[in-house]
Image: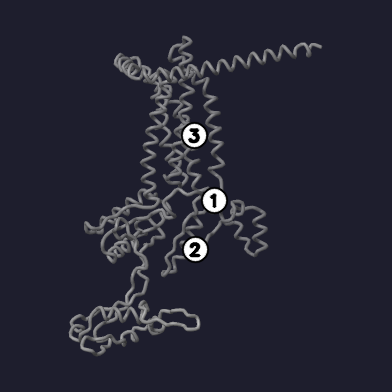
C-alpha cells in the first residue's frame, strides 16, 4: 500500500508564541521548541522508524512538482540475461549491498511469491505401467484446472445447451494429497494411481516476468541516500555489478531517471556549446570585433566554480534543476562584462587612451553593475527560501544563480579590464589581423544580409522616435494657445 504524507506549513515548524500556546494547550509544550525540519528530515525519520520491520520492503519518495520523466525512482538498474533465478540472485546480491553503495529503499522487481505445485514424472516407472505423459496432463487439466468440456446438457424447458465441465472442489484441488490419489488410464486397460508415477513438489515462481528485446530482465530500484549524487551512485552500481563476474550472456543497463540524467547531460553539453557559439557570434557582430567576445565570455568559466561552491555549501546536488540554473546563470553573468567593454570602446572612440578609458569605464559602470546584480539576486531570494510542494527542487536553480552571480561579481570587475588589455594587444598583432581578414572574407555572404537587417531595424527605430517627437511637438503647439489663455 501507499501512504501520502504532507508536512506542516513552514510557519508551524518554527518557534513562535502562537505555536508555544497551541502546543501547551495540547499538553506537549516542548514540541514548540523543536527546531525547524525539512522534507528530507521527514523522509529520513520515516525510514528510521520502519527499519525495524525486517519483513517489509519500504520506499520513501518525494512527490515531484512536475514530471521530468524516468518514473518515481532515482535509480532503475536493469540486469538482463537468460536464466531467471540467476538474475534474481544477482539483483539480490546488489540489494544487500545497498548501504555500502549509498542507496536506500532498494528493492527488486522480481518477486518469487507465487505458489506453484510442480509435477515431476518418473518416466521409467510410467513407461513400465503403460501411462503416457499426455494422460497425466489430461487428468490434471480436467480435475484441477477444469479446462475440458466433458459433455453437453440440453435443458428442455429453456431449449438451451450447456457445456458440462468436471472439476474437483476448491478444497480438494488445493490439497496435494488428494491430487496424488487421482487415477489415470493405462494402455494395459487398468487405472494407475497418480502417486505411483509422479511426485508433487511445492515451489514458488515469479508472479511477473519482465522482458526487453526478448530477454528476461530484473530491475533494482532504489533512492539515492542523503549526501550522495545520482551520477556517482550509478557509477558505484556499475562497479559493483562488474565485481559479480557475470557471464557474457548477462548485461546491465540504466533505466528510469538515471537514463534521463545521462541523456539530459549530453543534451545540456550540446546546448551549452551552441549557446557559447551563438553568444560569440552575436557579440562579434555587436562589437565588430573578433577578439573582445572572448573577453566577455571569460566571465562564464569564472562563475561556474562559485556556483558549484554554493551548491556544496547549501547541501544541494548537481541535478537537472541545478543544470537549468547554470544555463540561466550563463545568460545573465556576461551582462556585466558587456557594460564594461561597450563603455570602454565608446570612450576610446572619443579619443581617450586605452588605460584611461578602462579606468573611467569601470567607474561609470560600477553602479549599474551593482544594481543589476542586486536586482537579480533579490528576484531569486523568494525561490531560494520558498516552501511548499517542489520547493526542494526549485531551490537548486536559485542557489546556482545567486551564488554564481554574487561571488563572481567582484572577480569579474577585476578580471575583465585586465583581459580587455590582453586581448586588445592580441588583436593588434599582424597574425591576428590577417586571420580576421580571411574570416571576414569567408563570412561576408552571411554578414551582409545580417548587417542590412540590423541597419533597417536601427533606421526603423530612429524613424519611430522621430515620429513620436513630431507628434509631441504638434501636441505642444496645439495646447500652447489654450494654456496662454
424 with respect to 19 (left or right) = left
Q: Where is residue 304 in the image (x, y as percent from the top left)?
A: 41, 36
> Label 3: how many residues lie within 10 Å, few (<14), some (14-19) or many (20+)?
many
**Which residue in the structure is indicated by mark 1?**
389
Q: State the image quarter where residue 220 is shown.
A: bottom left
Q: Where is residue 127 in the image (x, y as percent from the top left)?
A: 18, 83
Residues at discs 3 and 2 in contact (Cβ within 8 Å) = no
Q: State the image quarter where residue 166 is shown.
A: bottom left
Q: How far apart in space, not on screen, are marks 3 and 1 (Cα)?
A: 27 Å
> Label 2: how many residues lie within 10 Å, few (<14), some (14-19) or many (20+)?
few
Q: Nearer the viewer, mark 3 or mark 2?
A: 2
Q: How far apart in space, not on screen, are marks 1 and 2 (Cα)?
A: 18 Å
Q: Where is residue 457 in the image (x, y as percent from the top left)?
A: 51, 19
Instruction: Answer above or below: position of 392 versus 208.
Output: above
Instruction: Answer above or below: position of 61 versus 351.
Output: below
Q: What label sits on residue 2 in the rendered view?
A: 2
Residue located at (53% from left, 20% from top) = 364
> Label 1: how many residues lie within 10 Å, few (<14), some (14-19) or many (20+)?
some
**Which residue in the structure is indicated by mark 3?**
406
Q: As drawn, which residue projects farthest toward the right?
A: 485
Q: Which sits earlier in the primary sequence, circle 3 or circle 1?
A: 1
Task: Give the number of marks.
Answer: 3
Q: In which quarter of the image is the C terminus?
A: top right
Q: Where is residue 462 in the image (x, y as percent from the top left)?
A: 55, 16
Amino acid at each position: 500500500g501507499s501512504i501520502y504524507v504532507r508536512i506542516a506549513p513552514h510557519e508551524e515548524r518554527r518557534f513562535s508564541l502562537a505555536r508555544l500556546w497551541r502546543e501547551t494547550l495540547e499538553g506537549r509544550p516542548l514540541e514548540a521548541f523543536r527546531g525547524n525540519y525539512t522534507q528530507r528530515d521527514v523522509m529520513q525519520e520515516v525510514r528510521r522508524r520502519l527499519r525495524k520491520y525486517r519483513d517489509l520492503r519500504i520506499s520513501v519518495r518525494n512527490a515531484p512538482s512536475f514530471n521530468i520523466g524516468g518514473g518515481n525512482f532515482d535509480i532503475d538498474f536493469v540486469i538482463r540475461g537468460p536464466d531467471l533465478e540467476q538474475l534474481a540472485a544477482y539483483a539480490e546480491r546488489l540489494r544487500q549491498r545497498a548501504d555500502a553503495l549509498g542507496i536506500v529503499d532498494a528493492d527488486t522487481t522480481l518477486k518469487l511469491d507465487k505458489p506453484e505445485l510442480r509435477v515431476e514424472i518418473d518416466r521409467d516407472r510410467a513407461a513400465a505401467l503403460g501411462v503416457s505423459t499426455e494422460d497425466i496432463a489430461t487428468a490434471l487439466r480436467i480435475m484441477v484446472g477444469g479446462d475440458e468440456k466433458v459433455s453437453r446438457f440440453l435443458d428442455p424447458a429453456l431449449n438451451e445447451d450447456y457445456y458440462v465441465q468436471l472439476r474437483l472442489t476448491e478444497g480438494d484441488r488445493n490439497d496435494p494429497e488428494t491430487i496424488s490419489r487421482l487415477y489415470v488410464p493405462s494402455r494395459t486397460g487398468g487405472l494407475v494411481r497418480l502417486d505411483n508415477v509422479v511426485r508433487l513438489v511445492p515451489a514458488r515462481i515469479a508472479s511477473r516476468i519482465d522482458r526487453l528485446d526478448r530477454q528476461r530482465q530484473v530491475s533494482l530500484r532504489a533512492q539515492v541516500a542523503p549526501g550522495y549524487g545520482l551520477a556517482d551512485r550509478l557509477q558505484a552500481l556499475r562497479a559493483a555489478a562488474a565485481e559479480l563476474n557475470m557471464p557474457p550472456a548477462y548485461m546491465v543497463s540504466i533505466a528510469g531517471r538515471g537514463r534521463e540524467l545521462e541523456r539530459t547531460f549530453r543534451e545540456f553539453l550540446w546546448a551549452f556549446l551552441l549557446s557559447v557559439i551563438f553568444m560569440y557570434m552575436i557579440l562579434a557582430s555587436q562589437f565588430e570585433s573578433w577578439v573582445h567576445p572572448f573577453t566577455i565570455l571569460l566571465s562564464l568559466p569564472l562563475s561556474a566554480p562559485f556556483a558549484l561552491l554554493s551548491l556544496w555549501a547549501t547541501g544541494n546536488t548537481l541535478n537537472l534543476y541545478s543544470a537549468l540554473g547554470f544555463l540561466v546563470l550563463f545568460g545573465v553573468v556576461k551582462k556585466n562584462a558587456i557594460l564594461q567593454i561597450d563603455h570602454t570602446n565608446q570612450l576610446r572612440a572619443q579619443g581617450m587612451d586605452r588605460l584611461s578609458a578602462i579606468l573611467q569605464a569601470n567607474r561609470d559602470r560600477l553602479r549599474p553593475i551593482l544594481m543589476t546584480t542586486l536586482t537579480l539576486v533579490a528576484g531569486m531570494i523568494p525561490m531560494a527560501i520558498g516552501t511548499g510542494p517542489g520547493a526542494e527542487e526549485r531551490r537548486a536553480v536559485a542557489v546556482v544563480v545567486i551564488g554564481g552571480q554574487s561571488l563572481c561579481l567582484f572577480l569579474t570587475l577585476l578580471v575583465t579590464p585586465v583581459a580587455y588589455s590582453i586581448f586588445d594587444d592580441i588583436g593588434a598583432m599582424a597574425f591576428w589581423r590577417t586571420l580576421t581578414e580571411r574570416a571576414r572574407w569567408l563570412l561576408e555572404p552571411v554578414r551582409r544580409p545580417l548587417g542590412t537587417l540590423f541597419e533597417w531595424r536601427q533606421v526603423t527605430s530612429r524613424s519611430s522616435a522621430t515620429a513620436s517627437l513630431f507628434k509631441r511637438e504638434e501636441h505642444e503647439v496645439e495646447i500652447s494657445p489654450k494654456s496662454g489663455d
